[in-house]
Image (cartoon, rainbow, N blue to C red):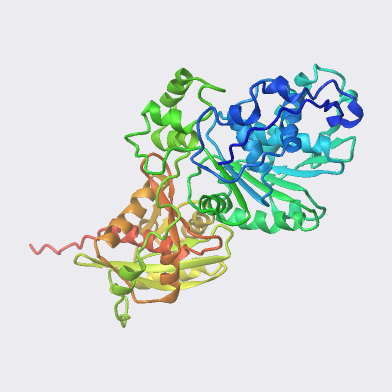
Amino acid sequence: MVNNTNEVNESDNSESFENGVTPLARRLQDFLPGGWDEKRDSHVPPLNVSNLSDDEQKRDDLLAGLELLGISNVHPQQLMTADVINSGEETVVIEEPRRSSKSTSILAVLLGRCLRIPQYKVTFSAQSGTKTAEFMRDWLGDIDAGLGFIEESAWPFKPRRQAGSLQWAFRNGSVFKFLNTPEAKALRGGAADVVWFDEAQEFDAEKSADLKAGALPLMDTRDDAQLILSGTAGKNRSGWFWDTLETGRKGGAGVAILEYAAHPDTTYEQINDEDVWLSAHPGIGTLTTLEKMRSRREAFADPEWAMEYLGLWPEDYSVSVFDSAKWTASEREVPKALPDNAAFGFDVSRNGSTAAIVAAWREGDDIFFNLVEHRSGSSWVKARIAALSKKHNAAVGLNDIGAIASVREELERGRLIPKARLVPVAYKAIAPSCATLLREYEDGHVLHFGQAGLTESFMQVARQNMGDKAWKWVPGAAGADITPVWAATMALRAFDERPVVKRLRAVVA
């Protein structure tokens, strides 16, 4: 970590605001009478931090931005945030717990740049258009108060609040733009010196790929352009934020990192230890108190507390759930025909682009999966699953949501499958269904026939938290098609819950 002693800059920086029209921009010593580095290093050390800038002019950007926001008391983690952003790396990833002033610190740096640098362009987005607009309204309220509730005409920028065109236009030509929706199409066109995604842990692998494709071209024509990804720990170890955080942790080229968090080895038994809180959360003692943290703890379940306030990511959500060596060893010869007691399951992808049907049955302790069909589109599913159920007199399992539930309704209305044979798996049964399949696999009871589509799907599936102890399948990488895994899960559920047909025996008098 850089630990230089810098001279206090006593020059009058009132011109930080265009034409000096606002009575802001105090001198550095007004904020930091003891010096920048001393203040920055006086509190909780980060878990991970890359090279730090000591550029005094860039540091002034933070102070000018804080003053515009009406903040006169600067905290150590805010100085750390500024020095990481100003390090010059193209990509910056910042993970801090709730109530540590993460977003405010980044905003202050970028506001200071907009004030200082003519024609500076910032593009900002949160996890949704609604959340982005909420950020803008809250920040405008802070700025209004910070400027002493003077008329907007005297502000150093003009806010534009029209839906679809949210931005702050500065007098020197700088623009701070708020995306109406976090999508690639909203990012197309124009250019940006900084593209900032806050709450970036909320973007899954698919959304991350879409945003990345739209954001990076904005920076192509701007010298020293930066991408900033900020957030707290997320539910899944996947996506743009997680991948960039991992790169920063490993010291990857072109990535600056600031991570305040508990040590990754911290267990759930240790998350109630207040010493762990104090070592991980820079907001305690600066923006909040230990007493308030105790109160907050009572309102959060263990996983949420660990993520939101200690920066701990849930384990094993990013890696393939199914061991490839065990999968290869469980391959068997393709059967000549499906057994009479087979059950079927089907799944349709979220956008309807692919669907799959899988047969499942048990023989003793073993479970067999056979990929019956897996192809593009979903319009073919209804007729195919109805024909299979009729031919084999078989139960059919399905995840009873969205487009899949619509197929069930069509099957019932058309009486294509007797209602008794349909096994819709409700939300509360999703986690047990997934857990049953995984447990049987880990015990060595799952067998298959080496079909490429089934193998590829099982090797690309990951897990996502659904509560304190529950989880479900999710794609382990952007674009991964795991419909065969879901179809297999539903088929096994249907087999285990298939209606028992009692044969009536004739009674001879």
Q: Is residue 168 visible?
A: no
Q: Is residue 373 left or right of residue 446?
A: right
Q: Residue at x 57, y 46 (%)?
A: 50
Q: Nearer the viewer, residue 200 or 20?
A: 20
Q: Position of residue 153 (x, y in %)?
A: 90, 25
Q: Position of residue 261 (x, y in %)?
A: 48, 38
Q: Does residue 358 appear in the picture of this structure? A: yes
Q: Quadrant of residue 86?
A: top right
Q: Residue furthest left?
A: 509
| 414 in relation to 267, above or below | below
* Residue 230 drawn above or below residue 437: above
Q: What is the residue that sits farthest to the bottom in this orientation? A: 336
Q: Quadrant of the C terminus?
A: bottom left
Out of 292 and 76, give the one closest to the viewer.
76
User: For the point 30% across and 68% down, which residue is it?
Assistant: 326
Q: Quadrant of the N terminus?
A: top right
Q: Residue at x 76, y 19 (%)?
A: 145
Is 247 situated left or right of 140 in this image?
left
Name the residue at 37% across, 45% down. Answer: 470
24 and 228: which is toward the camera: 24
Residue 359 left/right relative to 27 = left
Q: How many marks?
A: 0
Q: Position of residue 31 (x, y in %)?
A: 69, 22
Q: Is residue 182 above or below residue 284?
A: below
x, y (%) of residue 322? 36, 62
Vertical position of residue 79 compared to residue 141: above or below: below
